[in-house]
Amino acid sequence: MNIQAVLFDLDGVITDTAEHHFIAWKQMAESIGITIDREFNESLKGISRMESLERILVHGGVQDKYTDEDKARLAQEKNDHYVSLLSDLTPDHTYPGIRELLLYLQERNIPAIVASASKNAPKILNSLDLTELFKVIVNPEGIPGKPSPDIFLSGAAAVGADPAACVGIEDAQAGIEAIKAAGMYAIGIGDANLLKQSGADVVYPSTKEMFESPIWKS
Ligand code: B16
Ligand code: MG
């Protein structure tokens, strides 16, 4: 495959912020009497902030109790807490093989793109000292979230790449579905059973094995 661009999910692929999201959502949920656990948190991976809040309200059986204004305030509270937890993030928190893969792509003039649902992506990339290695960071504002293909299609369009010649990398089922709906080759990171169900073309247990894969040389 002659790769024209590589699109990276952020949370769960470039670094591990799922735990930070979990701590912040758990505290917000508890403040309105809802308990969430790590298993439930799995269903929030790759899902936008407001959609995550909706899922938590449904989980607590209170989806009709809050106005749009209340929801905006709850999401803001969660995000303020989440951002405060991110202050300990350093380049050492980058997953193994990611910086090496980005340098490898840069040497070959293959654009690397961030296709994340997170509005905090620019902040996180700065903390990891990775901003310069990406050609484009897709702004998810106003774009339909994963599993819709839009975030990935928008990233490919920004560098004029043919989606069929793009590779997408994701840790979440919704993200793999989005990559496949965009017509791209999908690399999953994590649970092979789960991610293959969503259509992943290949799955690696971690980013370390992904970087060592012959896939980049083909
Ligand atoms: P924010 P990804 C996603 O990032 C996270 O997996 C998901 O848990 C989070 O709710 C979403 O970003 C929005 O993040 O609240 O920072 O805008 O996996 O698409 O990189
Ligand atoms: Mg992710």
Image (cartoon, helix red, strand yellow):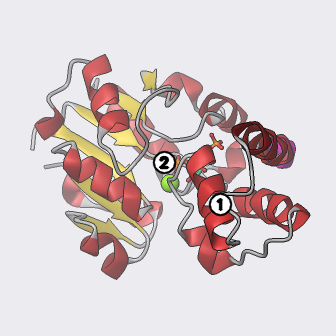
Percent x, y of residue 17: 67, 55
**The one of 6 and 85 positioned closer to us in this rendering:** 85
User: Image height check: is 47 above or below 164?
Assistant: below
Describe the element under mark 2 as helix, strand or loop: helix
| Residue found at x 22% / y 65% | 199
Farthest residue in the front direction? 64
Q: Residues within 10 Å of mark 2 (few under 14, many from 20)?
A: some
Cβ of mark 1 under 8 A from ligand 1: no
Q: Which residue is mark 2?
A: 98
Percent x, y of residue 67: 73, 44
Q: Which residue is mark 1?
A: 63
Is residue 211 in sight in this rendering? no
| Residue found at x 55% / y 46% | 48
114 horizontally vs 196: left or right? right
User: As shown in the figure, which amino acid type bears the numbered disc 2?
Assistant: Ile
Q: Which residues are magenta?
A: 83-87
| Residue found at x 78% / y 76% | 35
Q: Residues within 10 Å of mark 1 (few under 14, many from 20)?
A: some
